[in-house]
Amino acid sequence: MRNSNTNQQSIEVRETSAFVGALLIALMLPAAVPLWMIGQRAVAITTMVVTVALAFLFSSIRLVVQKGYVRVLLGGVIPVKNVALDEVVDIRRVSPPKWAGLGIRLMKEGTLYTVTMGDAVEFSLRNGSKFFVGLSRPNEFCELMQPLLGSRSITSARPASASI
């Protein structure tokens, strides 16, 4: 977790998982090899290139709080969520259900962005919607967010058993 400078109102967190990328490659390799062997080399190469690109994208998530916005970036580069910091009314640590899995998960409570199993930070927005970002150290993130949210609620002290 990197806190670039709270005076500049900037926080950056990157979560990575080599497991997700390796799993995607392991699942797609059996599809590419037979294609190569029967002469469909272009299709096999395309399959592997797409697989490596997806493995890269789904193996890391970057959460950036900067210039008045909260951004979630897939693979550290592709923005998938962009919310004005003024719209965030509460953040808290939660434990997503294990069945939620990894990646981008559309759930009843909101969208979960995660590459690691474990706890997440729930962002409650002014319009009543929520989104979640899986982090290995959610309490530390909540503490770093406190100066940025001011008088708005931060409930990082909730037990890890609070679930979504």
Image: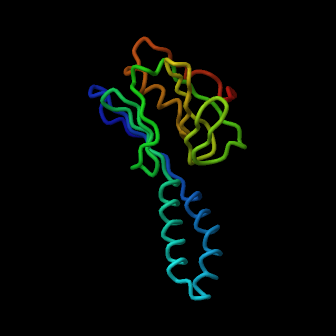
Measured as percent of width and height from the top left, residue 122 is found at: 56, 28
- What number of labels is visible? 0
Name the foreground residue: 82 vs 137: 82
Measured as percent of width and height from the top left, residue 66 is found at: 33, 32
Left-right relation of 141 to 108: left
Quarter location, residue 155: top right
Name the foreground residue: 146 vs 65: 65
Q: Residue at x 67, y 29 (%)?
A: 164
Measured as percent of width and height from the top left, residue 10 is found at: 33, 32
Name the foreground residue: 119 vs 46: 46
Measured as percent of width and height from the top left, residue 149 is found at: 41, 19
Q: Residue at x 41, y 31 (%)?
A: 70
Quarter location, residue 128: top right
- The residue sitting at the top extreme is 151
Location of residue 56 with respect to 98 vertically, above or below: below
**Which image quarter is the N terminus in?**
top left
Location of residue 79 with respect to 11 vertically, above or below: below
Q: What colouring does the structure picture have?
A: rainbow
Q: Residue at x 46, y 48 (%)?
A: 74
